[in-house]
Amino acid sequence: MGKQAMVTLSFDDGREDTYRVAFKIMKEYGLVGTINVTTGWVDGSWSVTNWPSAVDGAMTIEQVKECFNYGFEIASHGDTHITEVNDLRACLIKLRGWGVIDPDYPGFASPYSELTAQNLAKTAPIFMENNIKYVRTGHSHKCKRWPMRILFILQWLTGSSLLFQTFFKHNSILLPMNQPFMLPASEIKRSHSANQVIRLLQRSISSKSWNILMLHSILESKDKGYGQDVWYWDADEFRQLCQWLSKQDKQDIAVVTTKVGLKNLLENWEESRDVVNRSVGSRYASKRCGALF
Ligand SMILES: [Zn+2]
């Protein structure tokens, strides 16, 4: 893979509809993605009561295995949906036991996107101890400043593609990255349209950047969770995006798992890798942090 734009479809929690709806659609179009699994939810040792769009519950372990065997990446999302060292360890032990995680390249998606650049120094040891190679978080730090928050609300209210891009382009990943192992993602939620996302990706093709789309439920309008909260995306919008992706030239934009995206970025940007390593080293003044790669 040379230098090219990339996009990752990253699903959180291990929701039942990720298998039933999203995986089925993606198979039709020959696409793969990453599922960030909350292991305690999947094996039934932990439960949620306040995720209305996830009313149908979690995937089964067998379904997680099927997605992995098909080519999806399975990453950790905590055993009980928190960011804590023992919880993450428990999650990784289960994922290894199920044979669904690359032991050499485990990733972590931060539950509730609670990880920020500010608290990274405090939480970095949790990831180093568990050999975590990357942490996928929510919006980039830049998006949390108040002018961006206003734009976010406006794009939400108006459905404008221009405002959507203005806001979400800050989540596009280009080297040198500020936080090389913290990967920002764009949350795609209920009110978004496939066209908004496609425009963002068209922009990404020109800049050869990498966009990670953070998705939760993908629901058909007849599903029980549909319309219950903002943490789902309409299956028809999702289908439209997948269809568009399947028609793109692979040389222009590649659909990759988070792991492959990060490896590709680092391998193909030799001249930037030094910059990445330097910035990790200087920012945290820690050789161990640099060893995250
Ligand atoms: Zn989650």
Image: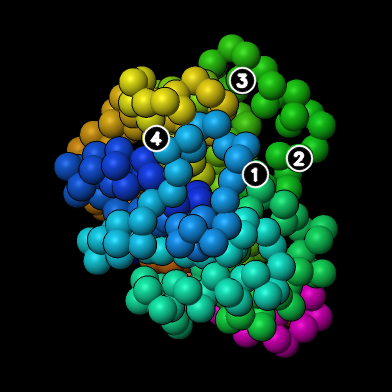
Q: For the residue marked with disc 2, what is the amino acid?
A: Lys
Question: Looking at the rendered structure, which numbered label has been put on residue 139?
Answer: 1
Q: Could you tell which of marks 4 and 1 lies nearer the N-terminus?
A: 1
The image quadrant that residue 32 belongs to is bottom left
What residue is shown with label 4? 218
Give, as a single range, the part of the protein colored magenta: 282-293
Q: Is residue 287 magenta?
A: yes
Q: For the residue marked with disc 4, what is the amino acid?
A: Ile
- For the C terminus, the image quarter is bottom right
Q: Tell me where residue 242 appears, x and y as whole percent.
A: 28, 37
What residue is shown with label 3? 155
What's the distance in space between the residues labelled 2 and 3, CA to CA? 15 Å
> How many callouts does the rendering have?
4
Question: Looking at the rendered structure, which numbered label has been put on residue 144?
Answer: 2
Q: For the residue marked with disc 1, what is the amino acid?
A: His
In the figure, is residue 205 to the left or right of 271?
A: left
What's the distance in space between the residues labelled 4 and 3, CA to CA? 21 Å
